[in-house]
Amino acid sequence: MRPIRIIARLDVKAPNLIKGVHLEGLRVIGDPNVFARKYYDTGADELIYMDIVASLYDRNSLIAIVERTTRDVFVPMTVGGGVRSVEDARMLLASGADKVAINTAAVKDPKLISAVAKRFGSQAMVLSIEAKRTSTGGWEAYTDNGREHTKLDVLAWAKRGAELGAGEILLTSVDREGTRKGFDVALVKAVTEVVSIPVIASGGLGTPQHLVEVVREGGADAVAIADVIHYGRFDLATLRRAALEAGLPVRQPKAAA
């Protein structure tokens, strides 16, 4: 079993780090670069930056933030929000990102997944999926921060994305996001069973045990965490200890506090 990656997720509404519930009701937390450095110092395996309003305003404002972060943070960074073209991806990767996450533009033009993967390698192409449960028991993919229906079945879309060249899936449960009630383990399990690429579970972590559950029962390769670390409910070291105590492999921290 590959080591579980513990990833700090930073949602940004430039120039601020923000946090909400169900991707709504956004509150300003602070300077994203300050938080990124703190999470690096306390052992985050990776960072995810998401410009959560980029698709609404037809822009991407993360380049300057990424450039600042890479000066003193040396773990892989995934950056998403407003990536609409191979050129957008190139600019973010050139600014210091290691991967780009694409949601809205991939839904509109799935060929973009293949184009980015072909140009930069599948490891740099992350398919971001925002999932909501449906009344029939499945999950529908959404765009624009969980606002817009796509009518795409999450499992079918995840499978197609992997076939088109995505190297990883960032799977966010809109229903659980910001609630601290635990991941939608059934959702994560359903996706990991239909794709062979790594799946990052995002949305809902409230206790260290939630990490253990989504890995053991859901098959997640990584977990993305925001609320509990932004508000200091507990730290990344606590999550790492919980994983080790449960017998899950985790990476050694790349930096010490």
Image (cartoon, helix red, strand yellow):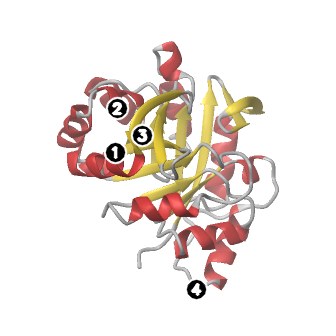
Q: Earlier in the sequence, mark 1 or mark 3?
A: 3
Residue 140: x and y in percent read: 47, 42
Asked whether the beta carbons under mark 1 and mark 2 sit within 8 Å of each other, the answer is yes
Q: Earlier in the sequence, mark 4 or mark 1?
A: 1
Q: Nearer the viewer, mark 2 or mark 4?
A: 2
- In the figure, residue 256 lies in which quadrant? bottom right
Residue marked by disc 3: 97
Asked whether the beta carbons under mark 3 and mark 4 sit within 8 Å of each other, the answer is no
Q: In the drawing, what numbered circle is on residue 247?
A: 4
Q: In the drawing, what numbered circle is on residue 157?
A: 1
Give the Cα distance between marks 1 and 2. 9 Å
Q: Residue 64 or 204: which is nearer the viewer?
A: 204
Give the Cα distance between marks 1 and 3. 25 Å
Q: Residue 24 or 123: which is nearer the viewer?
A: 24
Q: Earlier in the sequence, mark 1 or mark 2?
A: 2
Q: Nearer the viewer, mark 3 or mark 2?
A: 2
- The answer to whether residue 253 is above or below residue 151 is below
Name the quadrant of the C terminus. bottom right
Whether residue 201 sits left or right of residue 199 in the image: it is right
Q: Residues within 10 Å of mark 4 (few under 14, many from 20)?
A: few
Residue 171: x and y in percent read: 48, 50
